[in-house]
Image (cartoon, rainbow, N blue to C red):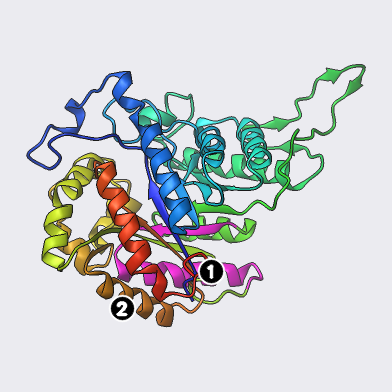
Amino acid sequence: MITRFSTLYVGHIELETCGLAGAPADDRRYPNQRLIETFGTAAALARATDELGYDTLWLAEHHFQHEGYECIPNIPLLAVDLAHRTRRVKIGCAFNIVPTWHPLRLAEDYATADILTGGRVVFGVGRGYHSREVETFGNPMLDGEANRELFEEQVEIILKAFREESFSHRGKRYTLPPEVPYRGYALQDITLVPRPLHHVEVWQPIVSGSARSLDFMARYGIKGVISATAESVVERWLRDYQEAGRRHGRVLQLGEDVILGFRMCLDETEACAVERARPYFEEHAKFMAPLGMLRYSEEHVSAVAARQAQSPTGATLENGVRNRSWLCGPPARIVDYLKSLEVKYPGLEHVMIAWALGTPRDLMLEQLARFAREVMPAFTSPAAA
């Protein structure tokens, strides 16, 4: 049963003239004073989600985006600030882009945030999809196989650091500790200081649904997030995730240990909601499609798996609504659809709502409040109750 609701904010600032008729994505450039607006929006969303009974405010890590689309470079650092502005809502890392870090620096930063917030930061890992980010930090992005290989070794190191009092690692890219003398003895192992005080849940996006990525997640007990993806693909991936868990000795109900995410706009009718969301949908497609990150149809998902750029005009919001990657319409209809998912996926507990890049802060706050008042009470969420 669905008992938990979250929201995702990827860190965009207020963008003028959103939509295909607005400024081209690559032509947008904002001064620093505008780019730091993202922190004020994050604080406003944190306060709202805390008061309205949401489980988690998820944030995205990105770098160097003078265009104003994704402007949060360090989630654990921001999470400490947001936790001290709120009482109970958790701050989720969706996701720490591991190839932009040394794995032990990320593990240290997260452990510090875990302690300072009393366990209110949720750990998440991703491989990245911006070459400007990952390659600038000296690691591969254009070479997909090298990127995946690096990511998998880094995650293995991070989990050793979290789960073992001391550890060593000998891999293709990392030798930890290094084979050097220290204070008169040869290093044999190393200890993360500090280590997290609370149990570390690890979440990872399911983007292409490849057998290799699902097997990796199952091997390490990593939970999955499927967001803004056509429902035919969602059903296939949920079954594949369940089967991967079975291969590694984990018996999961269909939908268990997975968050389903949707982009959303509530209004009195579907037509009104679609027209309200359209400029932000188009802005989102304008930025994301050349990166190959739309999953509104089977065709899009095939392009994602092949790491191919997509056309900004190749997706329509109507198609997204039909394929249930977008939920647009009156709250009662959203309730009915989510209730149908409870029947279809008996293990599903957690649903995440989000908005397209460029959606104004006031609209996100309005939608959060309306969803909390008119959708969440229909479910047996302790927070909603």
- Tell which tag, 1 or 2, sits nearer the viewer: 1
Q: Quadrant of residue 10?
A: top left
Query: Mark 1–mark 2 contact, CB under 8 Å?
Result: no
The first of marks 1 and 2 along the sequence is 2
Q: In the displayed orientation, state which residue is furthest to the bottom.
A: 343
Residue for point 12% across, 49% down: 313
65 vs 24, left or right, is: right
Residue 71 on the magenta segment? no
Q: Quadrant of residue 161?
A: top right
In front of the other: 309 or 88: 88
Disc 2 designates what residue?
A: 336
Label at residue 199: none
SS at badge 1: loop
Residue for point 20% across, 69% down: 322
Disc 1 designates what residue?
A: 382
Evaluate whether residue 206 shows in this view. Answer: no
**Disc 2: CA contacts within 10 A as few (<14), some (14-19) or many (>=20):** few
User: Which residues are the magenta region?
Assistant: 222-250
